[in-house]
Each structure stands twice: as structure tokens, then as C-alpha cells.
Amino acid sequence: MSKLFTFRPIGTVSSTCETSIDDDWEVIPVYISLDPEQFGGEALIGLDAFFAL
């Protein structure tokens, strides 16, 4: 029996990078924007605790 899944985007990820390279990703700024219709500011609480941010 197969199950059907529906996915809905929760936001976007953008970057200032203009080329596809596989070097120095840690120095390239990346921006995560959550869909404000689905998430409020409280969704970001604690996110700054991750080492990669």
C-alpha cells in the first residue's frame, strides 16, 4: 500500500554567491526566510545556538 505525501514550501534560502563552486562555503553569507503566513518570530528562537550560524 503506497501513501501520498504533499509538500508545501516553508520558506526560501538565498545567497550572494553568483557561481556554483564547492569551496569556501563557510565564508558565503546565506539568508533563510521563513514564510510569514506559516511562522511567526518565535519560530527562530534558539536558532542562533547552532554552530554554523
Image (cartoon, helix red, strand yellow):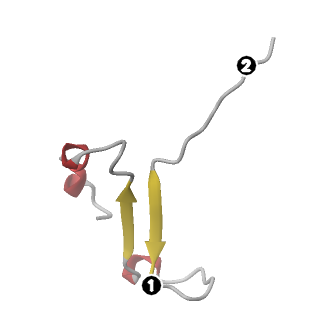
Q: Which quadrant would residue 7 be assigned to in this image?
A: top right
Q: Is residue 18 left or right of residue 52?
A: right
- Quadrant in which the N terminus is drawn: top right
Looking at the image, the residue that sits furthest to the bottom is: 18
Looking at the image, the residue that sits furthest to the right is: 1
Task: Tell me: residue 53, above or below residue 35.
Answer: below
Q: Gap in Å between the C-alphas at discs 2 and 1?
A: 38 Å
Element assignment for label 2? loop
Looking at the image, the residue that sits furthest to the front is: 37
For label 2, the crowd category at 10 Å Cα-Cα, with few meaning under 14, some 14 to 19 and many 20 or more, is few
Instruction: Determine the residue positioned at 35% across, 45% down.
Output: 37
Q: Nearer the viewer, residue 31 or 37?
A: 37
Instruction: Determine the residue positioned at 47% across, 61% down.
Output: 12
Instruction: Determine the residue positioned at 40% across, 76% down.
Output: 26
Q: Is residue 14 left or right of residue 47?
A: right
What residue is pinned by disc 1?
16
Instruction: Determine the residue positioned at 46% across, 65% down.
Output: 13
Name the amino acid type tagged 2.
Lys
Task: Tell me: residue 17, above or below residue 53.
Answer: below
Q: Of the residues under marks 2 and 1, which one precedes in the sequence?
A: 2
Residue 3 - label? 2
Name the amino acid type tagged 1.
Thr
Residue 32 - label? none
Q: Nearer the viewer, residue 46 or 24?
A: 46
Q: Position of residue 43 (x, y in %)?
A: 25, 44
Element assignment for label 1? loop
For label 1, the crowd category at 10 Å Cα-Cα, with few meaning under 14, some 14 to 19 and many 20 or more, is few
Task: Tell me: residue 33, above or below residue 29.
Answer: above
Q: Is residue 37 left or right of residue 24?
A: left
Q: Nearer the viewer, residue 24 or 3?
A: 3
- Quadrant in which the C terminus is drawn: bottom left
